[in-house]
Image: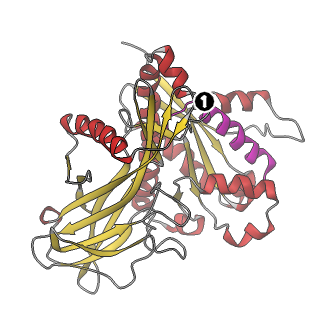
Amino acid sequence: MSEHKIFKAFFSYAHHDADTDPGLVPAFTTALEKRVNAKLVNARFAIWRDQEGLRVGHRWDAKMEAELRGADVLIVLLTPRWVESDYCRKEYMIFEAVEATREIGEYVAPILVRTIERQEKHFTQEQKNVYERVKSRQHQVAIATEFMMLSEAGRTALIDRIADDIEGMIERRRVLPSRIGSESHSAARARKSKEFDSRAQNYERVDFLTGGEVVLNQVTDDGQRDVLAHVGFIERLYVQGKRGRIEFGVRRAFMSIRDGGSRISKIDDLKSVGDHKTHYYTTLHEAPDAVTVCIDPPAGKSSLAELPLPPAKNENYLSKVAVATADLKAGQIKADLIVLLNAEGLYLNDGHVVSPRIEAAIKTIMDVARAKIEEGNNQTIERGGQLRRSLPVRERP
């Protein structure tokens, strides 16, 4: 029997937070470690954290740095004290450099356990820079006071969602190294060219959708069921050719939800991100009776990325997009995601950048999309090059 490969996570936290809420660190180390291991086959997951007080005085312990550089994943317990800590910020910056060498995917899992917004005005510039980089990543919210009052089942469900994210990171670490190692020398050289942003990922290996589902909530006191949804997108992708590559992102998306009747309806308080109206209701010609949400990039962005739908109250990542009658079942709902791609540029292997030819770019992108469809992605191509994909629908237990 072959030995299981062990994937490691480095747990970055401020000791003051552990002292203030003693149950937090075990919940996000011991319990999380167990939940991730329950999801893995022929692999093991272990979380390392400083239990020996290695951060003493002004000495940076070599053992701690070795653990950090050898970690597959960095888990950040994000709080004001974490941002304030020189050691915690150093841990993040070291791992950020390690992560950049991997080219594909992100491997930091931030968990926000204390609100920080009111303290931002007191940050130094260096603290602000690190906080902005961590905050820009997709993260889970588990505010300490609320988390500690959750039932055991509630805590398990929240930790399991974090475990899902980490499982995805581990899966990339298991699969991608062997594929990257098989690249030709010229392809590897092109991939590392300076003009190619390392955040852009290969569409033939990585899907543009990081996650997507529709959830039918339990019946509330007013006799209705909330319809919740989550969709997340990769920031930027590329298609590699012999002489260069085309980079693109997801310019706009439509999420259409219908039940064949009139048991799903819109809500008045559709939440958006900040002051910019990132999503709003619209009507599609082919589905006039559906509840359809149009999703646009946030202000200053040309493409959708990460979490375009803000979480509803008491939710970590699911957004409330509609309501349904109490008798509606998940099996009666059909949900589609329609995506419009945005070609951002054509890059040649010699480093020159030319004016993008949109039609040729879209054609190349669609060729790769068709290949993915043939492999079975529950996805079709509409006229005009739009991608339509069915989203899974489930009922919340």
For residue 195, which quarter of the picture?
top right
Q: Residue furthest right?
A: 57
Point out residue 359 in the picture as x, y percentages from the top left corner: 33, 46
Q: In the rendered image, is residue 233 in sight?
A: no
Q: Residue furthest top?
A: 1
Does residue 389 show up magenta in the picture?
no
For mark 1, what is the residue? 101
For residue 196, which quarter of the picture?
top right
Amino acid type of the residue tagged 1 in the rendering: Thr
- The answer to whether residue 16 is above or below residue 203 is below
- The answer to whether residue 107 is above or below residue 316 is above
Point out residue 369 in the picture as x, y percentages from the top left corner: 28, 40
Q: Is residue 221 left or right of residue 278?
A: left
The chief SS type of the magenta part is helix
**Magenta residues, as a range?**
84-106
Measuring 78% from the left and 40% from the top, which residue is drawn there?
53
